[in-house]
Amino acid sequence: MKYIDYYEVLGVPKNASQQDIKKAYRKLARKYHPDVNPGDAAAEKKFKELNEAHEVLGNPENRAKYDEYGKDWEHAEAFEKAKKEQARYQRSHQQSGRTTFSEDDFSDFFSAMFGGRGSRQDRSMQFRGQDIQAELELPLEEVYSTHKRTLTVDGRNIRLTIPAGIRNGQVIKIRNHGAEGINGGPRGDLHIRFSLVNKTPFRRDEDNLYTIVKLDLYKALLGGEIIVNTFDGQVKLNVKPETPNGTQVKLKGKGFPVYKKEGQYGDLYITYEIELPKKLTPREKELFKELAKLR
């Protein structure tokens, strides 16, 4: 596995605080979010790298393993066990009056650590299996509500509950569904990264939604009622007379579900875009000329 400097990805020094790491991630994630850069493959790749870096450095325990073992941080437990076993070997040899290892000793030691056959201890040493990384692509509308889905990973079917409000690039961990362990050791974990495809007229920013509603000139000038689409249906809105172009209105609670907070939703922000009438009739032109004279 190629070594990736996650500190460099987030643009923070190695002694950065957890708060600084969080701030850097949020700032860059907003900049490179796929919804902000539709169709930009480079931005999408950068966004995935940012999420991967935050998954490691944003968790103090994972960060400590990464600082110690670099690209092999996910196997920190195995390395720690190896260190302890090495220390035990050294103590046993020192107690027997030996202060050095022979090549055969090292061969036996590493065979025991990493599953080599023929070792005196290869049947007693157990190691946790490797974690499996998977990506699940879903349309945005499918994560508007909690639902179940069956995934096939490494030849096994896994029944998964996907909570409403999950975000693009978010990773969830399913314990003990990774690769098999060595010598009967526990399975690793399954890490699923969600890739959400948004083909709706709404732009999502965390739990809020944004959309543009076309407003004809007459409705903008005189006011009245209009029907607008939300993510889960239609609502009736009152347009105030003399509404300027670019006016934004907020529909509270009509945004996206808040992750793992049932019944809580973000807001929907609607921006009015006034459309000018086209293909005016001669009579309409006369009337507009009269209005111009009055102004």
Image (cartoon, rainbow, N blue to C red):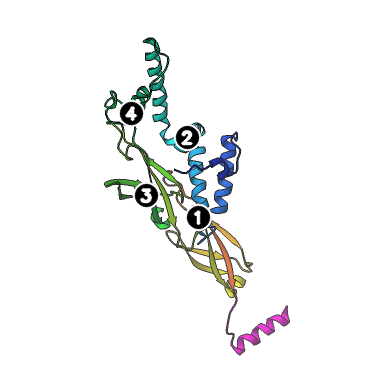
Q: Which mark is residue 62?
A: 2
Residue 146 % position (x, y): 37, 49
Q: Position of residue 222 (x, y in %)?
A: 60, 72
In this orientation, does residue 194 appear?
yes
Sooner in the amino-acid sequence: mark 4 or mark 3: 4
Crowding near pointer 4: few (<14 within 10 Å), some, many (20+)? some
Label number found at residue 220 = none
Against 238, is 145 above or below?
Answer: above
Q: Name the residue under label 1.
A: 44
Which residue type does callout 1 highlight? Glu
Q: Where are the magenta residues, as a range? A: 276-295
Quarter-of-image position of residue 126 = top left
- The secondary structure type at the circle numbered 4 is helix
Where residue 251 sits in the image (x, y, percent)?
52, 56
Q: Residue 203: horizontal and vertical position, in percent?
A: 51, 58
For the residues labelled 3 and 2, the Cα–Cα distance comes to 29 Å
Q: Mark 3 points at which residue?
A: 146
Apparent side of residue 153 relative to residue 2 in the rendered image (left or right): left
Q: Are marks 4 and 1 in contact (CB under 8 Å)?
A: no
Mark 2, mark 4: which one is toward the viewer? 4
Q: Can residue 209 be seen in this view?
A: no
Q: Which of marks 1 and 2 is nearer the N terminus?
A: 1
Dot 4 corresponds to which residue? 111
Q: Residues within 10 Å of mark 3 (few under 14, many from 20)?
A: some
Magenta span contains residue 42: no
Q: Which of marks 3 and 2 is in front?
A: 2
- Residue type at mark 4? Ser
Q: What element carries label 3?
A: loop
User: Who's the residue at 42% across and 26% down the image?
Assistant: 80
